[in-house]
Amino acid sequence: MRTGQGRAAVPATCGELVQGSLDGTPCLVSCPINVYSVAEVELSTQDGWQVPVGLPKAVAGLYAGLQALRPSAPGGCLRLHSELPRGRGYGSSTADLGATLYALGQACGQPLEPHQVARLAVTIEPSDSSLFPGLALFDHRRGSFCEVLGMAPPLCVITIDPGGEVDTLAFNELDHQTQLRRLAGEHRQAFELLRHALRSNDWRSLGEAATLSARVHQVILHNPWLEQVLGLARAVDALGICRAHSGTLLGVLLDGAHADARAVADYLRRRLPPQLKLYVHQLVDGGPYYPDACTRPPPMGVGLKYN
């Protein structure tokens, strides 16, 4: 017998617009795109939970949420719908985990606020700022602060996926303090450029901020395709590039009002090796989408299959 239901979606990411440290605290601003993880939670009077296989972080998030919310129902079912690969920078774990917690709050009749979801999420693993509305600066390791910088501008993101995988948990356990201290000036410059861009609708500055962050991060995690993609981005007068700072993904940022993103993607495909898969996306606001409530557009994604 069902006692409560919830359905929520959280967007994937094309890595981060900026990631680094501010005043010694590692933090990031995710790059949310219009592809989503959708979670459905049903509470039940039957004991025990049915959970998806192979998604331990989402399941851990479910049980953390149950401990926090303490619903009267003793069991239920969690279903997750996502075609995102793991370990490349799509923010798949955060999207799964966040959608699960937002859906659970709905099902329990105790809707969770983004800061509550983020506090639970970082107990499972370092998480993306795509949990928050708009574009947000977030302490992704401890969840000690979040600053919403503004709403997502109307930009296109051509994601460039070379495959491969980075174990994000293992990567985040490495000690990068020496490199972060050396890069502190560049990180502050990138974050300030991004703040300026979103305050003044200056998308060139946004591209500069993302490109600076992408390039200086090479000393922490080298992406062998970055310089070639950056050269091609400059050739098509793109705003800049972004990257996954703990994954393999790259992105080319375009002003949606002044660039034909599909034509640019075709240009890039002809000049990059065929093993690099390209997809055209939109930059979107982070935070929860509630399809059943029709409070925001239903999470349709773009109908692409990820390899």
Image (cartoon, helix red, strand yellow):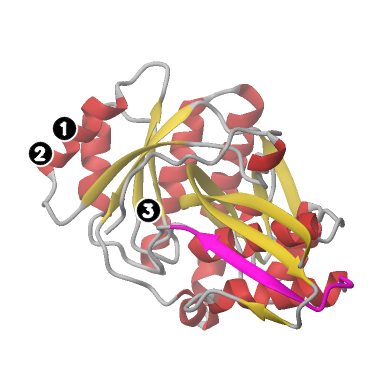
| Closer to us: 136 or 279 | 279
Q: Which residue is mark 2?
A: 270
Amino acid type of the residue tagged 2 in the rendering: Arg
Amino acid type of the residue tagged 1 in the rendering: Tyr
Is 76 on the left or on the right of 165, as rendered? right
Is 247 on the left or on the right of 263, as rendered? right
Q: Which mark is residue 267?
A: 1
* Badge 2 vs badge 3, beta-carbon distance below 8 Å: no
Q: CA distance from mark 3 to mark 1?
A: 23 Å
Q: Which residues are magenta?
A: 71-82
Label 1 element class: helix
Res 247 quadrant in image: bottom left
Q: Which residue is mark 3?
A: 215
| Closer to us: 235 or 43 | 43
Q: Residue at x 67, y 47 (%)?
A: 288
Pointer 1 local density, CA inside 10 Å: few below 14, some 14–19, many at least 20: few
Residue 103: x percent and y percent?
Answer: 70, 57
